[in-house]
Amino acid sequence: MEVRGKMSEKKVTVAEFRKTIATSLGTAFGIVIGMIWTNVVLGAFSTAGISLTTIGATWFEWFYFVIVAVIVTIICVLAIVFIGKWGGKK
């Protein structure tokens, strides 16, 4: 005797796929932001004479690094917003 139960087949919709991809990319960009700001803070310690890393030999170099971090942050936040809107489409 063969007994067959109902198998629930859940099909992945395009909206669910986009939402998952958008969430993953948003997380990845957030990690990039965190990594660059970690280096900015470590560079400030190094520039102040507290040797934690080799980044930031002068205050000018550290300030330049801060500017780069701000630009990367803005780009990543814009990408997160754009991808979030894309992922929310049905």
Image (cartoon, grey):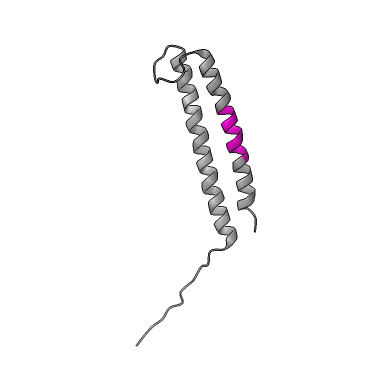
For the point 51% across and 68% down, which residue is it? 10
For the point 52% across and 13% down, which residue is it? 59
- Quadrant where the image shows the N terminus: bottom left
Q: Is residue 13 above or below residue 63?
A: below
Instruction: Pinpoint residue 82: horizontal percent, then vertical percent.
Output: 63, 45
Q: Is residue 5 magenta?
A: no
The magenta-colored residue range is 69-78
Q: Is residue 70 magenta?
A: yes
Q: Is residue 11 above or below residue 81?
A: below
- Quadrant where the image shows the C terminus: bottom right
For the point 46% across and 77% down, which residue is it? 6
For the point 58% across and 24% down, which residue is it? 67
* Main secondary structure found in the magenta portion: helix
Q: Return the residue nearer the eye: 63 or 33.
A: 63
**Which residue sits furthest top?**
49
Please state the total of marks drawn on the protein image.
0
Q: Return the residue nearer the eye: 62 or 77.
A: 62
Q: Is residue 63 above or below residue 4?
A: above
Instruction: Pinpoint residue 27: horizontal percent, then vertical percent.
Output: 52, 43
Left of 54 or right of it: where is 12? right
**Which residue sits furthest bottom?**
1
Instruction: Pinpoint residue 8: horizontal percent, then vertical percent.
Output: 48, 72
| Residue 42: quarter of image | top left
Left of 11 or right of it: where is 55? left
